[in-house]
Image (cartoon, helix red, strand yellow):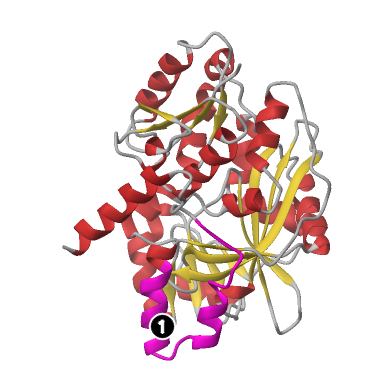
Amino acid sequence: MNAAVVLQASGPNALGIVRSLGRMGVEVIATDHGSTALAMSSRYARGAVIPDPLADPGAFVDGLLALGRRHRARPVLFATHDEALAAIGPREAEIDEVFLRPWNDWAQMQVTMDKSGQHAAARKIGFPIPATVVPGADDDPVAAAEAAGLRYPVILKPEYSPEFRRVFRAQVLEAERPAALREAWGRAARYGPQIQEVIPGDDDQFWTLGSYRDRTGRPVASFTGRKLRQWPPHFGTARAAEAQWDPALAERCHRLLDALDFHGISQVEVKRDARDGRDYLIEVNPRSWLWISLATACGVNIPYACYRDAIGSPIAFPPGHRGGKRWTLITRHAVATAREVRARRWSSRAALGSVRPPIIDAVLDPRDPRPSIQHLTRMVRRRG
């Protein structure tokens, strides 16, 4: 049987893939540059340490190839972060001799990973995008924003985000006024960021299509849902989310993936604007996303659909799924929610609704207790 190799297995994203595959009887190898990565402790995986793709892409690929060559049947790769895709891309011919790689070739993947490439595809089909400008190296960012008609607040959003996130420990940099924009630009200009107008609305207006599309671009597993709360608020990652099937959203987002000629697992995230009811593109993540385990809990096992297609035994999930099920990263959600309720930034009613059953947690699971114990132990040590 072909094993599955999950890359960068330190967080809930990877753990969701491991559990989704392992419970279907797939042999799973969780890899990371740290020996205590969260998903390595799962009962459904065995761990393997390989170098960090962001710190040393060449060593990462070499280590991955060495791992793959120990298997008779080519293992199936699962990426959880962009940096693994970027490290593998230039050497995909070597990788493809050893692994099954269920995503686009590098030439096309580069277009999808680039925010400008996503926007070009969106404009081609009339998919709404927030007002955006990309100043030149010698341009004044405030003048460029004004010339493009952007309204404040604005954000600086990198074309390619892994190093940006590691340096600033944030997805984006926000600027409420021109002076703040000029200061943020001075710190972030070397990452070639876009300046983008902020779509108003709370965290629960961020909607997602998560899917797997086969090599022909046919969607074989699709899920839709929305975030309920992020950390940090407004420009962070999900700490609570909810499944809701929205067929119109799925259709629009698949049209965008058609325009990108996309193959693989992806998340298309949009923000719903109450002013006009339209969904504005936030980004396309051309790999799995943080709360992919909620799709599996709703009966749409995206990692397994990907695995089966990669090994030449495809399955397809019919469109639609049950809604109303919620997902949390409770160790983060509980602390942040208590602060927000005390500060009256969130109502008690909405907060309680975010944890209303049926609910699953990103980490805590009595059927797979070791990641839960490891995660809670780390939390206690940090607060000790």
Relative to 193, residue 49 above or below: above
- Quadrant of the frame with the N terminus: top right
Look at mark 1 in the image and give the residue it sits on: 340
Relative to 206, residue 293 above or below: above
Q: Residue at x 39, y 35 (%)?
A: 40
In-front residue for pair 47/32: 47
Report whether residue 179 is seen: no
Q: Residue at x 55, y 74 (%)?
A: 354
- Quadrant of the frame with the C terminus: bottom left
In-front residue for pair 380/167: 380
Q: Position of residue 283 (x, y in %)?
A: 61, 57
Count of labels in the image: 1
Relative to 251, residue 8 above or below: above
Q: Position of residue 20 (x, y in %)?
A: 58, 40
Q: Residue at x 75, y 44 (%)?
A: 221
The answer to which quarter of the image holds residue 218 is top right
Q: Is residue 352 left or right of residue 46?
A: right
Q: Position of residue 143 (x, y in %)?
A: 50, 75
- Callout 1, which amino acid? Glu
Q: Residue at x 41, y 14 (%)?
A: 66
The furthest residue to the top:
72
Q: Position of residue 211 (x, y in %)?
A: 70, 47
Q: Is residue 346 magenta?
A: yes
Mark 1, secondary structure of its residue: helix
In-front residue for pair 125/350: 350
Relative to 193, residue 228 above or below: below
Q: Which residues are magenta?
A: 333-361
